[in-house]
Amino acid sequence: MRFKTPVEIYQTRLKIIKVITVIFFIALIVRYWQLQVMRGPEYFILSEQNRIRVTTMPAPRGLVLDRNGVIISKNRPAYNVVLYRYQLTESIKDIAAFLNLQPEYIKERVQKYSNMPISEPVVLKMDIPFEEVAILEPRLIDHTNLAISVEPIRYYPFGDKFVHILGYTGEINEAEIANGNFPDSGSGDLIGKTGIERKYDSYLRGEKGEITDVVDNLGRKVQNLLTKDPKAGKSLILSIDAEFQQKVYEIFGDNVGAVVAMKPDTGEILAMVSKPSYDPNLIQGHFPEEKWKELLNIENDPLQNRAIQNTYSPGSMFKLVIALAALQENKIDDETTYNCTGLSYFYRNPFRCNKASGHGRMDLYDALRLSCNIFFYNVGNKIGIDIISSYAKRFGFNFRTGIDLVEEKKGLIPDPEWKKTYLKEPWYAGETISVTIGQGAVQITLIQQAAFISAIANGGRLFQPFITKEIKDSDGKIIYRTQAKVRGLLGISPENMEKVKRGMWGVVNDYGTGWGAKIFGKEVVGKTGTAQVIKKDTYGDQKDQPWEFRNHSWFSCFAPLDNPEITLVILAEHAGDGSVVAAPLAGRILREYFKLQESRAKKDIVNEN
Amino acid sequence: MKIKLEHKEFYYPMLLMTLGITILGIAFIYSTTHDSASSDLFIRQIIWMIIGLVLIYFLNRIDYNIVARYSPILYLLILGLLIVLVAAGQLIGGVKSWFYFRWIALQPSEFGKIVFILFLSKYVAELGKAQLSLRDIIKPTIFLILPVGLIALQPDLGTAATYIPIFFGIIFVARLRLRVIISLILLFVISVFFSWSYVLKPYQKQRITTFLEPEKHKKEAGYQIYQSKIAIGSGGIWGKGYLKGTQSQLKFVPEQHTDFIFSVLAEETGFIGVLAVLSLYLGLITSFITTAATARDKLGVFIATGFAFLFAFHFFINVGMVVGLMPTTGIPLPLFSYGGSSLLSFYIGIGIVMSIRNRRFVYL
């Protein structure tokens, strides 16, 4: 039995409310089901990213040492002011005011690194002095997005003396990120830009460390989860003799050009100097732009390593190629002579000798000794361009030597086929005449010449030059040792080789053009070269010419004759005749070299006793 | 035939659900504040709960008709306090909502809700009509606008808005004519457009646009909702465990011991915990409506209905807000969020509803 109550009339509407309430609940449950059950895993990842911040620690690069263990490239700490970009607690303007920078500059920096992971900080101020660190550090508590980070950067104790060998490091740029040559480096990382630093970047780089922190919503560290220490890069032991390299650098003075010293029986580079030079310590780290501009403004492109990255006409040094080719082809012998009157006509063109009055009757020995052009014009004309170019190529010209540096040039040995392909013109016989004295289109590098002279010294083996002898891991264990590698053989009989060597001996020791390289106690064997920069009809005094039109001065040699220890190639741009500048420089450098060897030998004896 | 009830008895299911939600709330207030400067907030909430239980004990025994008798005076008192606040209140966090007495802060607008329920219910019950016409709701509308206007001047639009469902709940159940309801809905829609164009301040508009497109405002105002959704979603089915919610413990979730406390619960206890707590709320809200349906007199029907609307409105807005279904407003989760005035006013309401339940008709 049921009573009709006074509130009976309200039941319908209360029922409606109940139904609506239940519908609302179902809607809520569906919504929470969606978020927590269906999309739960997705949100879980988001929440993990929220709380974990991975900071990378750069690894110190490996050391670079010379053959005697002298450190020539190492690291020092640089203090950078960095900006953590997420959840900025203050405006760019305030940060700029605090750091005394322009707001536009900060925006530019942030923009530049927009594709770097958000957890990675952007460097705003690079390598600040320690006094500034002391001032900034305590005030950073109010600037939670800023931090001072310590980053190991390169320090080159010998400044500008090794830069063309070592290269330098700098921030990876967009092109380098894109080309995939640096797979383990990302935006903001320092990488080797050139030289050994570039060539061996993957060894020197090491492995970055990682700090994984739990952070709160302001990016403040709450707890450290995991710290993976950075692993230092591997060390390189170079074949360079640092002490000798410095001597060469000093002796070469203010000349523009390069010097290469090599061990003839292995291909190890003992010294490699290119001038003008520059101090890589000035362009370390993240903001080299302004310094770059300064550098580029210096005349004569100091960035270029002239020993491998520039090509020159070999001048008379090329007569060695002609002599060896002609002897081996049996086109000349000891009896072959030509009369030099200072001028000869070939194909109705006049070709001059370096001595206007003429050398008189010349055989191979005298022609090499005095660098007689007329003799070699005739010899070259006799053997022809195809033989010349095939021998020159066999001697390693026209190809990169494969030295462990970057951007090596390969030079050029011209022949009719090359001319047809590239210049779409036929070969003129007169050009062969120019080629015999290393002019015309012939272009070589110092390193090619050094390998060639070494092959003459060692009996015909053409070595691949190298600078890096060993790679050691951080425990000091040798993981790689460069083996001397024979690239090819000259293919010249010992008798013929002897004849050319004798001529080269005469150059230095028998009142030849290279007399300036003569030193006491060691027999130096070499050949001068004078490369004409522009074609001239008259042989006026070089001193009257503007500097940039003067001849390049060449000298290449090895010493001593019997048991060669060193090959030396010198080029001084626009310095004049090879005999006047390059040969005397070679003499001074060789004297220093042997002095150094002697003093070391004495020291060893003392130590043994 | 009427059965005499023992008025001193408690309606235990309602009491236990109330206590259950409050204690869970305290547990999560602890979870969100234990490592902060205000780590004693959960103790304060326990004290408020005990005071609330004492109030329930007395209100349960007193006939709600007697309580309602004082409602006009209380209504005027609240209006007076609100005028004082607007005229001379202390500006805290941009609003003048609180009176400070030593260590406690009281919010008249919170207690005003209960007073408004009693006052409006009494008025409508005394009209004695089987159906309400448009003319019958003129005075109730004025009773509504007075406190709502004053609270909106504080300015605390969120709290002001909570008075509106009370009004509509009561006049709906009191059988407002259908055509009036339809015209009111039309009027509401028009006034929303009007206030969007002329009344709302930019930050208030921003809250609403944020609600409509949270992803777009991810880094700005939508950040709170975005982080709250990450917290809730990342809780998954089983949750990350009590005190182990990374979003909450690392303070990614905003306002987490007050408005966003449900996100913390969802992160740490997962969908299972959410279901359990939602069930408690569903049980409580249905028990309020059932109380209305079985009340002895009209006054009881209206008071229980008004309170059910107040409670449900808070609940749906808050739980909908943290998942982005509702706009961001400063509306706390009833019985769960930290806040003395809010907790006490809900306990008072529940005490009165229990008193109605105690004096119900029993159908045999």
Image: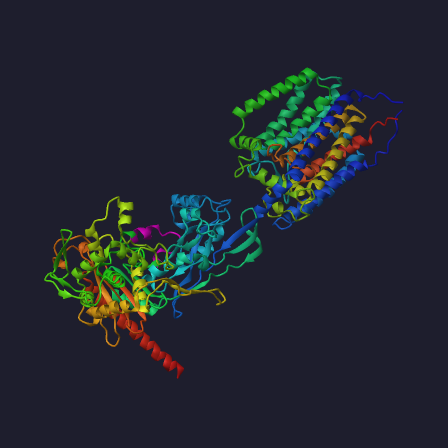
Is residue A547 among the parts visible in the rendering? yes
Q: Residue at x 35, y 79 (%)?
A: A603
Give the quadrant of residue A563.
bottom left
Residue A183 left/right relative to A352? right
Q: Answer whether residue B177 is magenta in the image.
A: no
The x and y percentages for residue A80 are 43, 54
**Main structural element of the magenta stretch: helix, strand or loop?**
helix
Q: Residue A205: percent from the left, percent from the top?
A: 45, 58
In the rendered view, would you say A292 is above or below B355?
below
Residue at 84% across, 27% down: B361
Note whether residue A303 is visible: no
Horizontal placement of A221 versus A409: left or right? right
**Res. B129 image quadrant:** top right
Q: Nearer the viewer, residue B306 or B178?
A: B178
Residue A65 or residue B188, whichever sits in front: A65
Q: Residue at x 40, y 70 (%)?
A: A69
- Looking at the image, residue A83 lies above or below residue A164: above
Q: Position of residue A16 (x, y in %)?
A: 74, 24
Q: Is residue A294 magenta?
A: yes
A340 relative to A111 in the view: left or right: left
Query: Picture coordinates of residue A601 (x, y %)?
Result: 35, 78
Q: Is residue B290 above or below residue A267?
A: above
At x 78% / y 36%, what residue is drawn? B14
Task: Name the quadrant of the C terminus of chain A.
Answer: bottom left
Q: Viewed as shown, does residue B6 lie left or right of B149?
A: right
User: What is the magenta range?
Assistant: A281-295
